[in-house]
Amino acid sequence: MEQFDEQEFIQSHLATGEELAPERFPQLSTLSSAFFYNFVPVAREPELPEVVFVPTSEDTRLETIGAMASWNFLWEAAQYRKETFENIRRADENPELARWINALPNTNAYLIPDTPSKYDAYAPLFHLLPKKIVDRFGLPSVKRPLWPGHAAWWNEKLMPSDFEHRLSKAFAAHIWSHVDSGSSLQAFSATEPLKLLSHSLDFWLPYVLIVLEDLMRDFERCEPENDRQKMLLAKARKEDFEEVTIDRPRRGGTLWIGEEEACDVTDLVVEAADRQGQLRQLIDAVRSNRVADDFSPIWSYAREDFERKLYSKRSKVRVSFVELTDTLPVYSARSEYTDSLLWQDFTSLLDAKERHIVVALRSGSTKLADIASTLGYANHSPVSKALDRIRRKASAFLSLN
């Protein structure tokens, strides 16, 4: 019997040769939900998607990841997938996860395993990057990736230990040219006066999911496989459900392939995230040195502490704090909660020429305010910690130490 070569198996998941051609790389595909379900509920008015990072333990990792994959493939059910999931999954398969899901309000939430690399969460963003940016930031060229993911162990082996940090910088370099038409893909290079101090992938995640769902809705539905399925489908279609219809799952297929299609999808992601124009207004204001402070009083102390520690260096540095409101929630250890709002660091920029630091936090309303304590994310003070990291990085750029 031939011995299993783990390294060879891992390397087989990297694109090579013609798979790296601009016409074929990057790409992302999806499986049909028909691999999991004979029928799916389809929300008549789906809510916008949210994202929840769910911790996994070694003891229940496989069961938890399997349950989350099944949950995510019910994407057409949107905010009604909880009821469907309860009816088809046995609680004894993973009692802890079942109890937690039972406590969820009805919301269109994707459940993402909080793996060390977080590749499964950020795969839709990662696989928008052209080969030159993937190489520039030392990221692997993955072959035939799929969404939703299933936390395959080999992906964790393929990713560098600082995958999230590298991808954050890589995606900022990629997305910048789509947000700001006056910028090139070389933004944040050594000659660019604007320095990136922080950039949150979590901000973009719900918006790329909106685009993914729109693309998946273009696939035709699977035909019934036998007479029994035809009979059950006809019976279900006669039912008058107020919130959903019942149908066969959609087929799977390629969501995008090649740089040109990935570029078009990136534009769609920016449009989804910038429907109120906040992103372009922020970038334009930074470039023209017209940023006006517009910040929630909730963070007054954190802001004062940030400025005091920076100004203690006796350097003339201007600091502006701005807020992007009504963004879509992502629940993780990087999120902070005040009443019915979720907060995260979105991005921070340093204009080295003008010695001007712009810190942008984002906020969004949430129905899952209790989820932080349930998942063990409460009392981590992620916003204050993010501000401290930003301040230290700005100090290093400005040679204040």
Image (spheres, rainbow, N blue to C red):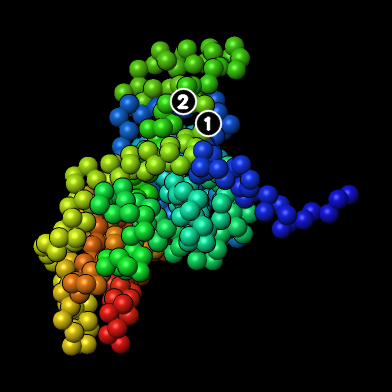
Label 1 residue SS: strand
Nearer-the-camera pick, 346 or 34: 346
Horizontally, residue 60 falls left or right of residue 278, namely right
Camera-side residue of 358 and 377? 358
Let me know if residue 296 appears in the view: no
Query: Is residue 193 positioned above or below 82 on the image?
Result: below
What element does badge 2 sit on? loop
Which residue matches tag 1? 253
Query: Mark 2 and mark 1 in contact (Cβ < 8 Å)?
Result: yes
Q: Position of residue 144 (x, y in %)?
A: 58, 42
Report the Cα–Cα distance between label 1 and label 2: 8 Å
> Measuring 46% from the left and 55% from the top, which residue is drawn there?
133
Residue located 61% across and 42% down the image? 18
Q: Which residue is mark 2?
A: 219
Q: Position of residue 111 (x, y in %)?
A: 45, 48
Is residue 169 visible in the rendered structure shown here?
yes
Mark 1 burial class by Cα count in 10 Å: few <14, some 14-19, many 20+: some
Residue, x 37% and y 43% (percent of image)?
A: 266
- Specify which label sits upstream in the sequence, 1 or 2: 2
On screen, residue 248 versus residue 185, left or right, reads right
Residue type, mark 1 in image = Gly
Establish if 332 lies above or below 178.
below
Circle 2: residue type = Phe
Quarter of the image where one finds residue 195: bottom left
Residue 46 quadrant: top left
Q: Is residue 294 left or right of residue 85?
A: left
Q: Quadrant of the C terminus?
A: bottom left
Instruction: Choose top left, top right, bottom left or bottom right for residue 290.
Output: bottom left
Q: Percent x, y for residue 168?
A: 40, 60
